[in-house]
Image: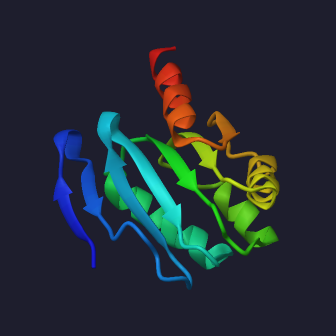
Amino acid sequence: MSEATTVCGGLSRTHAAPHHQGGQGVACTVLPNLIVRAVLAQGTDLNEGTVAQLREQLGALAGGRKVAVVLQLTGIASVSRTARIAFASIAPVSSWAIIGETPVDRLLGQILLIADPGSAPARYFTSEHEALKWLASLDRA
């Protein structure tokens, strides 16, 4: 079960179990510098419902502000066409850093990037460290 706490600027911090037990779902946590880490459960079929869950959690955490998001999609099963369309319309995101580990993760991440996530900068990474470094460089620009 998650626990939410408010941090500076009205942004909430959600603490979730670090590992998912398969199945559908997404867990979001707030990192330093008000970056949100969204982790998709391994085996998840990324569909319109999962994207709606992600949008809802990001909206609750952001409290009306735009946030940078690190989206961990390692081990997801698929990305539907409706998910790509819905992903592109998630409003509270200022930038996306999509992270995966395998060639299949890279392919699924590129499918999301093709969805044109609005005017938000977006890029695929194999390292969370590199993703966070890139997001920090955008913040300074």
Locate residue 9, reporting x and y percent. Answer: 21, 39
Tell me if residue 82 comes above or below residue 103 in the rendering. Answer: below
Locate residue 52, reporting x and y percent. Answer: 55, 71
Q: Considering depth in this image, is 33 or 121 the residue closer to the camera? A: 33
Residue in the image at 77% along x and 59% along y: 108
Residue in the image at 41% along x and 48% along y: 36
- The quadrant in which residue 67 appears is top left
Locate residue 132, reporting x and y percent. Answer: 49, 34
- The quadrant in which residue 66 appears is top left
In the drawing, does residue 78 fall left or right of residue 72? Answer: right
Residue in the image at 67% along x and 42% along y: 118
Q: Considering depth in this image, is 22 or 15 the residue closer to the camera? A: 22
Q: Considering depth in this image, is 66 or 45 the residue closer to the camera? A: 45
Q: How many marks?
A: 0
In the drawing, does residue 22 fall left or right of residue 98? Answer: left
Residue in the image at 27% along x and 73% along y: 2
Q: How is the image coloured?
A: rainbow
In the drawing, does residue 35 fall left or right of residue 76? Answer: left
Q: Considering depth in this image, is 44 or 9 the residue closer to the camera? A: 44
Single out the residue that lies furthest toward the top: 141
In the drawing, does residue 10 fall left or right of residue 140? Answer: left
- The quadrant in which residue 72 appears is bottom right
Q: Quadrant of the N terminus?
A: bottom left
Locate residue 81, reporting x and y percent. Answer: 81, 69
